[in-house]
Amino acid sequence: EYRLIARGGRVVWVRDEATLVKDEDGNSLYWLGVQYDITEQKRTEEEFRKSEERFRATFEQAAVGIVQVGLDGEWLRFNDKFCDIVGYAREELGAVSVFELVSPDDFERDFDRGVRMLAGELSDYTEEKLIVGKGGRRVWINLTVSLVHDDSGEPRYFIAVAEEIGKRKQAEEERQRTQEQLSQSEERFKVLAQEVVEGIVLSENGRIIDANRSLTEMFGYDLGELIGKDAIVLTPPEHREMVRRRISEEDTRPYESMGLKRDGTAFPIEIRPRHLPYSGRRIRVTSVIDLTERKYQEEALRQSEALYRTVVEQAEENIFLVDAKSRRVLDANDALLRSLGYTDDELQEMTLYDIVAHDQKSIDLNIGRIMEEGRRSLGERQYRRKDGSLADVEVNVSAVPYNGEKAMCVVAHDVTERKRAERMLEEIREAERNRLARELHDSTLQDIVYALQEIQVMQVVSDGDPDPALQDTADALKRSVEGLRGAIFELRLKETLDRSLVSSLENLVDLNRRMARGRYELELVVEDDFPSRLPGKAGQELTRLVQEALTNVRRHAEAGHVRVELGLDGVLAYVVVSDDGRGFDTEKAGPGIGRQSMRHRALELGGEFDLESAPGEGTRVRFSIPVSRLVKG
């Protein structure tokens, strides 16, 4: 095939067919040629080629996925966009069966449609559906499927156009969900609006379009009477201008006004307006709260506060408020100002740490307990006066709200004068005890000892058998001497403690040695680091606790050796009285008076009491207390 230029310069396509003609002997004679004009055929082929190129470009560059599938279900052709939709690379998709992309739920329906198209019952179809992409990913597409026929009408292949609509479906679902939520919200609003205590009125352009039951009951109207009315009718004339201005300015700040009931009664209300979408419109939703009860309570509270202020200011007790967090003094009555000598301005610049004459740790610990329990009695404490002196007070504290914050109300009863009187009385008692001790020692005890010695002389010089009555008298006198010495020790306990605790214990141990009459050895061991001096009460109670333990040993233990030991174990001070006596079963033994007394004394000092004993293994009594608490008394 080649081209020729015809007359006029027209290009003509020809197909030249030549045949070599030979004679009978096979010799070549000549060429016989026939030329065919194929110009029109070439033009048709060129147009088809350009059409094919245009189709191929459209196929490959289309913004939608396009596939050709053979009648046997095998891929014939697919473009890059379809590969993007299903997530496969071109070479990967070729190895994947067409049917693997079909959702199992759609398989039978899609197969039936293919059969119907081949049967001529269905020319094409379009639907939105889910297909299975790479990795099992579900992809929403809008699919259009057609069957392509040849010139004779025979089906050749299926062609499908797939548009990914995932974002659109997501937007539609979101829109539907939003619409459902909006509908549910409106329904909930209607239900709640009917149930809430607040009155709710819906208005548009100032006209009432709906209201809840609380509002109609609050104002005394039927709902039908309110619909269509100007919302301003619910306020007295003198307040309408202000309310109308707020409505026109679309002011949504809460404010107080007056409401007007159907019977003409005016009452205080709080109005809280806002603008909301409602059934496709923008309306004004107004909450109305009846303030009648609140105003009554506010007035009652104002009167109560005035009464409280009068009572607090005139009270003789020291009363003040403290912020629980900052510990700052918030308010105080005149009694506290007079007691401590500060002005009101000075006191409000101070914290609780400036007033309470105790360490910060104990103050914080008490505050924590107060806030946890709600109220607490702290017993006796000391407050600092402006002049540096200390005031003795009995303190009770309650947790209270104050301006929306947590605070403490402290009531401190000044017992300084009482404490001074108690100290004076104690001094008088101590002087009297010392006087009695001297008289008992110098007079009574000496007389008894002299009588005992006379009896002992009579027993020695007697020639006959010992007189049992005389021996009984001697024993009785010995017991009297021991008892009087114990009483004298008790009366002089404070005096000996003023010298030192060790001195007092040595006297106590010496007394018990004499009372033991050699039945057992008695040992006193005091470690060097044990406090040598203790506050009066602590020293007295500790000495009496040891005395109780030694009395029990003398009366019950039948011991050969007794040890009294005082020492320190870390932050604890301890006192141990142990013996090697007969011991007893602590579970079977009843709660003896001696043990109860020792336990009570230990608890009063803030310590712990332990008793260990077993038959034949002796007895060990141990009292322990934090050193810091012991030295403070």
Image (cartoon, rainbow, N blue to C red):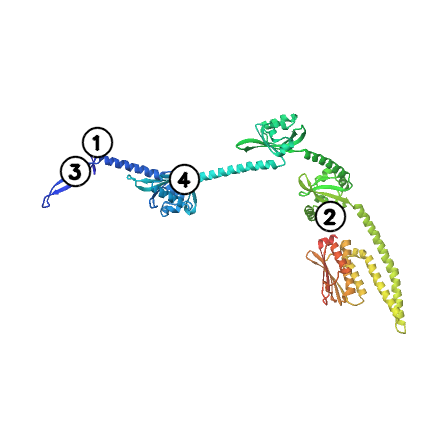
Secondary structure under tag 2 reads strand
Name the mark nearer the viewer: 3 or 1. 3
Whichever of labels 3 and 1 marks the residue nearer the N terminus, that label is 1
Residue 535 left/right relative to 105:
right
* 50 vs 227, nearest the viewer: 227
Residue, disc 1 = 10
Whichever of labels 4 and 1 marks the residue nearer the N terminus, that label is 1
The crowd level at tag 2 (other Cα within 10 Å; few <14, some 14-19, many 20+) is some
Residue occupying image coordinates x 84% and y 55%: 433
Q: Quadrant of residue 87?
A: top left
Residue, disc 3 = 34
3D distance between C-alphas at marks 1 and 2: 125 Å
Residue, disc 2 = 378
Three-letter residue code for mark 1: Arg
Whichever of labels 2 and 3 marks the residue nearer the N terminus, that label is 3
Secondary structure under tag 4 reads strand
3D distance between C-alphas at marks 2 and 3: 134 Å
**Residue 141 in view here:** no
Q: Quadrant of the N terminus?
A: top left
Name the mark nearer the viewer: 4 or 1. 4
Where residue 29 sits in the image (x, y, percent)? 10, 42
The crowd level at tag 4 (other Cα within 10 Å; few <14, some 14-19, many 20+) is few
Residue, disc 4 = 127
